[in-house]
Amino acid sequence: MTVRHQLGYPQTRRDDVVDTLHGTPIADPYRWLEDPDSAETAAWVAAQNALTEGYLAGLPQRAWFTATMAAIVRRPRTGVPFVRAGRWFVTRNDGRQDQDVWYVADSLDELLAGGRVLIDPNGFSAGGTDSVGSFGVSPDGARACYGRSEGGSDWQTFVLLDLATGAEIDDAPIQTKFSEPTWLPDSRSYVYVDFAHDGPADGTQAAALAGAKLRLHRLGQAQADDRVLLEFPDNDELIMWPELSHDRRWLIVSIVEGTDSRNRLWVYPVLDQAGPSRLGEPIRLIDSPVAHIGFVRTVGERLVLRTDLDAPRGRIVSCDLGTYERTGLAELIELVPEGPDTLEHVVPAGETLLALSLRDAMPVLHRHALDGSLLGELDVSGGAVVGLNGSVDEPVAFVGMSSVTAPTEVSAVDGGSGQVTALPELVRAAGDGSTVFAPPEVRTERRVAASKDGTAVPYFLIVPSGVDLAEPRPTLLWGYGGFNVPIAAEYRPGWSGWLAAGGVLVIANLRGGGEFGTDWYEQGRLGAKQNVFDDLVAVAEDLVAAGVTTPDQLAVHGRSNGGLLVGAAITQRPDLFAAAVPGVGVLDMLRFHLFTIGAAWISDYGDPADPDHFATLLGYSPLHNVRPGTAYPATLVLTGDHDDRVVPLHSHKFTATLQHAQAGSAPVLARIEPAAGHGAGKSAAMVAAEWADLLAFCAFHTGLRTP
């Protein structure tokens, strides 16, 4: 259908800002929108939101989607339990709470019966947007430390708790991001990743992060006095991820550059098992980032590791620390060889290993002995694994499965016997089910499109039962394609709403993702990034050619790197889509590295300071490929004013540029959520409202009539 609207867009000042990069003049007329705290930016945001709210309020589908999404997010739900230091933990929500509540118990039976409330974030803030971002338990089981996030910010302030009573314990305030407390054996100290910063930790800081430091915190000690264990002053992009081995003998530290999946692996011996824990000099086991090397567990002097070294689909290996210290050689002994499926995750379950693999982007779980021998495939079903938690100290592990329309369903897996036991009690303990939303019945097909270079690009086609594809249907296409992240047919609240309205849903497996191993990922990064956009276009064209939909009935949506995907798709093929919703997207590919954690993405996107990378980035940067005089699809740009990961300037500048250039009559609107970040920490009400607006917008512009 063709929808025509004439909107009076807010006046957006255009300045004569021009940078010359590698000899190329680059205009940036909306540079002033990069300042999130200026009065002018605030006024612009208010004007855009007022315009958008007025438009959305007039959509006939909005009321139905608002009511439907409110019911969907009110479904009781549970997280995936985990065991630490002899205690069981889980998050739950009775459907009426803005944030999930944390529970603790001294046994699994007690947890299934309800457990004790440990942390209730719903009392943190009046708006319900403060949340728990990380969590760690001391080895003696006496204390926990969690990260409290304000307004959806990536910044966290650590809070210390007494696990027996749930009472807060006084400690010096520790602020960080992208980190959790990794406790040492003395249970009086932990290590964490620190980024120096000034100003409030509320999501309003846009400055580029300084280099990461691995610090050791003693309880009661000021953060400024915490000892620096590891830093790389010559490379600000290196970040560390620590983990204590279950035998408490080793601190395993993975060192990565930005978001690169390849890492170094250093091992710090824990010198004192009694008294304050001290760490010895690191054993630089893997000191060249040639592959991904992930720690699983120890077996005596051996580390069990997951790696894609010489195995693009992944394998499980072991490495003997004693041999390394004698010879200086990190010999990897293969336990589980590479197979046809993509090895995604491995966890211990007592004296066994549970391995999650993806078979054509669908989950498969296997059980292995510690020597790697196969003990069997586990009987679990679902579209995606959303959590797999295991422990060396406990033979029972927990797996959470979801489907497109069903949130997490948890099962216990006995590592010794392989028995799988569903735990519906967890959801029943979350709520009484009085506000249950009945999800639609759907059928799922697996289809394949041919990309521009001939590569087969699979996708999930999800159709509501009773919908006949003999005629083209309004269709919502979702994709991501980056950072080695696998995309599965998993639960998102909005999918149930769209399918309940009779829309068709498509989830694409694009290159750059992690569904099909390292080679698939490499074909969608750096100089090959254009393949990702070509893959999405190929799926869209395949849907049209197959008669599933038409360009007038096709909407495209993605978030973060997926927001980049949508921005590139509509600037390269505006004719192919009726509606587009880029959410919290990376849209200015020439300046993304100058703000917050943006420089970490150079590993995937490339460095604008490099002439060759610059040429590639300029070729697809959504902001720089908007062409005046072009008719663009109806576009709703989503962001949060406290997003300190993909800062809102990306969305602001793209919105202003697209509004200025739009030659068609379709609207270009911005929905800018106040007191919200990149996505985590949003209240249930905010989640429901955003999905309702997104779906109503897509429905209106694709001709989907709500029931």
Image: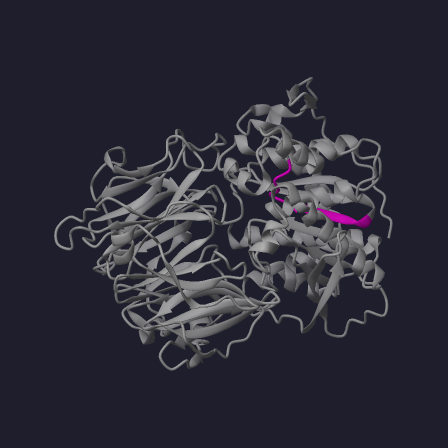
The quadrant the C terminus occupies is bottom right
Residue at (44%, 33%) from the top-left corner? 209
Q: Is residue 13 visible?
A: no
Left or right of 218? Residue 619 is: right
Instruction: Tell me if residue 514 comes above or below residue 337 in the rendering.
Output: above
Determine the image quadrant of residue 118: bottom left
Q: Which color scheme does this rendered protein use?
A: one colour
| Span colored in magenta | 576-587
Residue at (59%, 40%) from the top-left corner? 605
Residue 578 in picture, x, y percent from top left: 80, 49
Q: Is residue 61 visible?
A: yes
Residue at (55%, 24%) from the top-left corner? 38
Residue 232 in picture, x, y percent from top left: 37, 34
Q: 129 or 108, which lies in front?
A: 108
Seen from this angle, which residue lies furthest front?
327
Left or right of 483? Residue 696 is: right
Residue 567 part of the magenta-drawn span: no
Residue 5 in picture, x, y percent from top left: 83, 41
Number of callouts in the render?
0
Determine the image quadrant of residue 587: top right
Q: 116 or 663, which lies in front?
A: 663
Residue 640 in picture, x, y percent from top left: 56, 41
